[in-house]
Amino acid sequence: MERRIALPMTTEIADSLSIGDQVLLSGTVYTARDAAHERMCDQLAEGIPLPFDPKDAVIYYVGPSPAKPGQVIGSAGPTTSGRMDRWAPQMIALGARFMIGKGKRSPEVIEAIRKYHGIYFGAIGGAGALLSKHIVKSELIAYEDLGPEAIRKLTVKDFPVTVLIDCAGNDLYRLGRENYLAMRKQE
Amino acid sequence: MREIDVSRITDAIARMCISANLNLPKDVQEALLSARKNEDGTVAQEILDRIIENYRLAGKEQVPICQDTGMACVFLEVGQEVHLTGGSLYEAVHEGVRRGYVGGYLRKSVEVDPVRRGNTNDNTPAMITTDIVPGDRVRITVAPKGFGSENMSALKMLKPSQGLSGIKDFILETVENAGSNPCPPIIVGVGIGGNFDHAALLAKKALLRPADSHHADPFYASLEDELLQEINELGIGPQGFGGRTTALAVNIETLPTHIAGMPCAVNISCHVTRHETEVF
């Protein structure tokens, strides 16, 4: 059963989510990959604010393909989140505690998620055509020179994600696999 | 001597870059459908359904299956009786990639310099591999390769004494370590033998083989089956959420090697393993 959630997300709702929950997100998310994270954190060190308000923000780790004429955006599935682990704890501490990506996270990121009541959501890697259907608006807001790695403000509608790491620090990658293997063993 | 103007190669490469990124090869489609039938995990079944829905949608609407439209890996088998005219062959290949990626609304994912970075903005250069073969034909394969899976690939210079079990352990360890990162279900390309560089190339070429094909040598063909079964007992599953389908195929390619070594390379590819071939 999928649960519909409107963004920005409240702490109350975040706390109510558990790993494996299927969620449909609607509202604003910001795109950022390695190059954008590095630049944002370098600029913060120089006293330059982030290109968006990080409070309760959702960061989607994606570098979309270009939109064809008439399209809002090209294909837009998640990239491997682990590459952003170096900067994610700082972003989470600043308020951007919700992330959409794919793949494992470091213990430091999991700890930051737990501490700040964040959520790490997973979208299906390699399903960029399907996921793009849930993006209704796309606006480039910073770092245009980074091309596919520029920061975009996206409006998503019923964007399908699964809770991978919840506020308690549970990790679906570990538990999902354990549960499956336990089910196999019982047969 | 048969003459081929390289502008024809440019046109073909541009066409193949686009087509390969929008249309999943039939063998991978069939492997996914058959994996869906055999999948016993409930979450895993849903994920496979979405993956299947995604490639169908991409084909129908002619949009990229995945936003990572890859580095353009181009394999050229050039007959030694062919005379290429009209300019540089490699420049013709790069131009084809440029036209395909810019004109086809594909993502430009190539950096000018590995350390100092900076996008080339046209996805060039292509990663070109050339083989000179008998005959008067040119066979071109374009295989866009994403880096979620490329990053999880590995090579090890195994010792001969480590034997078959050393090879199996290394392959399983590489898949285990990759986990959810390379977008499972994956296709595992393995190169055994040769030397350091040829082992890696063999692993890449193994990914060009159809998912349902086998090594010509029954010894390696059964090793492919055995490894596929063992990988699918790891429980990683589609997207790493748990399930039977961690890999769709294991393809092994081999070469003779040195008395002191047994190189083994594992090139992992995602469920969007793409390739197209044209022959001139």
Image (cartoon, helix red, strand yellow):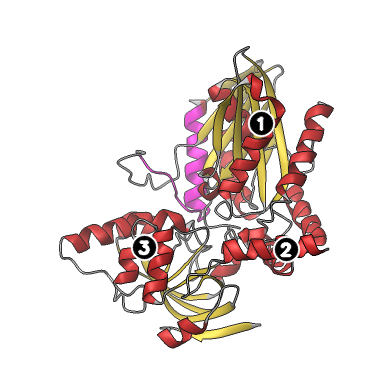
Mark 3–mark 1 contact, CB under 8 Å? no
Quarter the N terminus of chain A occupies: bottom right
Residue B78 in view of the camera: no
The amino acid pointed to by label 3 is Ala
**Residue at image point 48% right, 53% down:** B107
The amino acid pointed to by label 2 is Ala
Q: Which residues are magenta?
A: B90-112
Dominant secondary structure (helix, strand or loop) of the stretch shown in magenta: helix
Is residue A106 or residue B118 the one in the foreground? A106
Mark 2–mark 3 contact, CB under 8 Å? no
Residue B188 at x, y = what percent? Answer: 66, 42
Name the residue at the top extreme: B259
Left-right relation of A76 to B186: left
Residue that carries the numbered disc 3 in the rendered image: A88
Which of discs 2 and 3 lies nearer the camera? The answer is 2
**Which is more N-terminal, label 3 or label 2?**
3
Left-right relation of A122 to B233: left
Residue B222 at x, y = what percent? Answer: 82, 34
Quarter the C terminus of chain A occupies: bottom right
Label 2 neighbourhood size at 10 Å, few (<14), some (14-19), many (20+)? few
The amino acid pointed to by label 1 is Ile
Residue that carries the numbered disc 2 in the rendered image: A182
Mark pair 3, 1: CA separation = 36 Å
Is residue A62 or residue A11 the one in the foreground? A11
Mark pair 2, 3: CA separation = 33 Å
Which of discs 3 and 1 lies nearer the camera? The answer is 1
Q: Chain of mark 1?
A: B
Q: Secondary structure at mark 1?
A: helix
Q: Which circle marks residue B167 in the picture?
A: 1
Tell me if residue A129 is in the magenta stretch. Answer: no
Q: Does A178 sit above or below residue B18?
A: below
Q: Chain of mark 2?
A: A
